[in-house]
Amino acid sequence: MPGTNPDGENVEMQTKDQKMAKARDAYKSGDVQASRDAHAVGVHSEKHSGSASDYVKSVVFGGLDGITTTFAVVAAAQGASNGFDNNDKKDGCSGGMTVAKTALILGFANLFADGFSMGFGEFLSSRAAMDHARGEREREEWEVENAEEMEKEEMVELYKEKGFSDEDARGLVNIISKDKKLFVDIMMVEELGLSIDLDDEWGPLKSGAVMFASFIIFGMVPLFVYLPQKDGTTVFAIACCATGVTLFILGAVRGYLTAQHWAKCGLFMLMNGSLAAGISYFVGWIVNSIVN
């Protein structure tokens, strides 16, 4: 999309998300020229209610929690089955079929119950954060309307703490305070540390839905392997591999979206899930041994 920059030169226009993606790629590759090119490209305003990066937290935490907790149930069932004695096995209380059924029943029950809890919790926390930010904004708007000079002095002191001289701080505040909405916007971030989009009323619901969907989708990975109800040991090995690969991919995507080393993030996610599953496996084995 064509456009012009402040100097009147023709430049290609793009959305903020597109420009940010190019800048991140340039940073990761250490390409200074690509970084300059990304910043030189114009940006056209695009009204939207959130972008993919807004929901990274919900996707990552939902997916990690979903696959880890569900696989923990599977690992506990497998660990407990290895503690059955010979009489149990003769009576059909162990073996692949029993472990598979146990993993599927408990796994799916845990998956949807925990998924709903996680999604609803994300919705409530996002809504609470939005309500808090809205209340603070209303207070700041009232104070600017009734005690603007005092608010300006607070911002001057804040900028002086950041290293600005008194003259520069006052000049900066005098400029931004000419637009009261902009002044309040900046105070919300600089003074209160709040940068929540108050215009997106559906934001909390969307965050909760993304958390729930991520939890369910990733959590189903180890359970799908058990659907044929084959030999428990073989299926458990396949489930371990599928879960490990998914955890690594989830971590790698998180690393890419947060401008971190994708391999390190992938390995960290894999290690976290492996430790959780290992603990669950041995707890299942120990508890079953004690009970028997």
Image (cartoon, grey):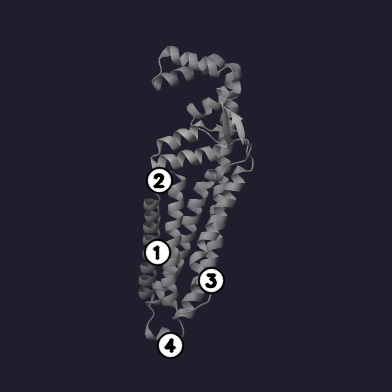
Q: Residues within 10 Å of mark 3 (few under 14, many from 20)?
A: some
Decide: marks 4, 1 in contact (CB < 8 A)?
no
Q: Residues within 10 Å of mark 2 (few under 14, many from 20)?
A: some
Residue 195 position within the rendered picture, expressed as x and y whole percent measured from the top left: 53, 34
Label 3 SS: helix
Q: Is residue 68 visible?
A: no
Comparing marks 2 and 1, which lies closer to the viewer?
A: 2
Residue 106 position within the rendered picture, expressed as x and y whole percent measured from the top left: 51, 69
Q: Residues within 10 Å of mark 1 (few under 14, many from 20)?
A: many
User: Which sits in the foreground, 132 or 50?
Assistant: 50
Label 2 SS: loop
Label 4 sits on residue = 90
What's the amino acid at mark 1? Answer: Ala
Decide: marks 3, 2 in contact (CB < 8 A)?
no
Measure the C-alpha gap from mark 2 to mark 1.
26 Å
Q: In terms of image quadrants, where is residue 84?
A: bottom left
Q: Residue at x 53, y 76 (%)?
A: 228
What's the amino acid at mark 4? Answer: Lys
Residue that extends furthest to the top in the rendered view of this protein: 167
Vertical order, 20 against 83 (above or below): above
Label 1 sits on residue = 277
Label 3 sits on residue = 105
Q: Residues within 10 Å of mark 4 (few under 14, many from 20)?
A: few
The answer to which of marks 4 and 1 sits earlier in the sequence is 4
User: Which sits in the foreground, 28 or 273?
Assistant: 28
